[in-house]
Structures are given as structure tokens and as C-alpha cells.
């Protein structure tokens, strides 16, 4: 089973997936790295400083990955487009702005990502594409705490008792923060 660990850039996906992989032994596919290393993209968008992914090529590549009893976590802001289960990490816009600024993102890219977070873009896409969707807030929390929530969700799915109510999608409304 593939589980998407997704969310707007800067919400903590890579930090959390690193903890899950290195401290708890989960198998993690860092999709953005795979896309770049195996040229699974159509073109480079220099204006937006990103690549345009070929989702069909990515799905074909992932279908070649051996599945096991343990779920495989896919870390990417687009993982929800290729998984049946999605865990969407969310971050309040003011904190997200600080995180992206520390990464050196250009102001236009910061604005684009904050707008996407305020409009629930990844959450909406997850609900449209996935059988199960969970939402976890990272605002003001350590990545260890967030990883604990993600583990709780994964363990619940694996045992057949997913915590549907505790991490129900739609808990956050940051639409009033759009500038």
C-alpha cells in the first residue's frame, strides 16, 4: 500500500518522512528526488523554479516497486495524485511564510504556496483522488510530535481501524489569510 505524505512545500513532509524512515524503519520514497534522478519530468519551468512532472511515467515507475506487508510512504507535494491514502500536513500561513523564507524562496513562490495552503489546494486534490484522507497540523509543533500523529494514522490503517475522526479532513480554514 502506498500512503502519500503530502502538503504544501514547507509544511514538514521531508522532515517527518526522514524521522519515519530513520527512526522507525518505514520505507519512504522521496518522490521529488526520484523524479529528478530518473528524469520523470516533461520540462523544467525556470520561471517557477521547478520541473513539470510526467505523472504517467511516475506511476509506471512506482508500479515496479515491490510491495510488502508494510505500507510504503511517498513523500511529495504531489504524492496524493498517485496514492490511495493521503496524509496531508497543514501549516498556518504565517508560519509557512517564515519557513519558506528561511529556505530562500523568491517572494512570488512564497506567495503562491501560501495561497495554495489558504485555499486547501492539496487537501481538495487529495479528497478528489484518494480513498482515505487524513489531515495533521504542523503549526508550532515539533516534527517528532507530527511523526507520532502520522505513525498513529499508519498503524490504524494497518490494523484496520484508521483514526478517521481524530484526523478528519477539513479542520483548518485559513482562507481569511489570503492577501
Image: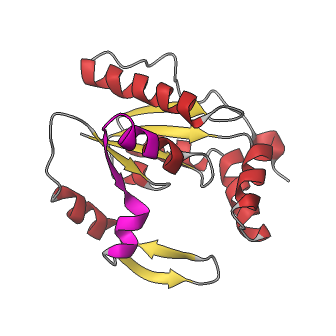
In the picture, the quarter occupied by the C terminus is: bottom right
Could you tell whether 68 is left or right of 169 in the image? left
Name the residue: 15% across, 45% down. Answer: 67
**Can residue 40 be seen in this snapshot?**
no
- What is the count of numbered marks? 0
Query: Of helix, strand and loop, which mostly describes the magenta segment?
Result: helix
In the rendered image of this protein, does residue 60 appear above or below residue 25?
Answer: below
* Magenta run includes residue 21: yes
Residue 72 x/y as whole percent = 28, 43
In the rendered image of this protein, does residue 13 appear above or below residue 62?
Answer: above
Could you tell whether 113 is left or right of 52 in the image? right
What colouring style does the render use?
secondary structure
**Considering depth in this image, is 96 or 174 the residue closer to the camera?**
96
Name the residue: 49% across, 32% down. Answer: 147
* Magenta run includes residue 20: yes
Residue 117 x/y as whole percent = 67, 48
Q: Which residue of the protein is positioned furthest toward the front in this rendering?
A: 23
Name the residue: 34% across, 20% down. Answer: 156
Name the residue: 22% across, 64% down. Answer: 61
Residue 153 picture quarter: top left
**Considering depth in this image, is 54 or 106 the residue closer to the camera?**
106
Residue 58 picture quarter: bottom left
Q: Which residue of the protein is positioned furthest toward the right in this rendering?
A: 179
Residue 20 x/y as whole percent = 40, 38
In the picture, the quarter occupied by the N terminus is: top left
Residue 49 x/y as whole percent = 60, 77
**Can residue 10 be seen in this snapshot?**
yes
Q: Give the range drawn in magenta.
A: 18-37
Amino acid at each position: 500500500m502506498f500512503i502519500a505524505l503530502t502538503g504544501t512545500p514547507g509544511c514538514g513532509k521531508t522532515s517527518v518522512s526522514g524521522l519515519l524512515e530513520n527512526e522507525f524503519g518505514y520505507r519512504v520514497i522521496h518522490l521529488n528526488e526520484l523524479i529528478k534522478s530518473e528524469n520523470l519530468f516533461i520540462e523544467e519551468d525556470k520561471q517557477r523554479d521547478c520541473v513539470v512532472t510526467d505523472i504517467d511515467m511516475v506511476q509506471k515507475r512506482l508500479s515496479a516497486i515491490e510491495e510488502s506487508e508494510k505500507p510504503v510512504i511517498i513523500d511529495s507535494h504531489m504524492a496524493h495524485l498517485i496514492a490511495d491514502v493521503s496524509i496531508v500536513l497543514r501549516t498556518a500561513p504565517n508560519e509557512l511564510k517564515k519557513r519558506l523564507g528561511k529556505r530562500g524562496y523568491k517572494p512570488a513562490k512564497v506567495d503562491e504556496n501560501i495561497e495554495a495552503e489558504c485555499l486547501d489546494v492539496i487537501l481538495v486534490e487529495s479528497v478528489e483522488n484518494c480513498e482515505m484522507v487524513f489531515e495533521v497540523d504542523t503549526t508550532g509543533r515539533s516534527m517528532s510530535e507530527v511523526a507520532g500523529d502520522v505513525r498513529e494514522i499508519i498503524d490504524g490503517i494497518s490494523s484496520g481501524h484508521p483514526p478517521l475522526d481524530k484526523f478528519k479532513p477539513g479542520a483548518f480554514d485559513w482562507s481569511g489569510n489570503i492577501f
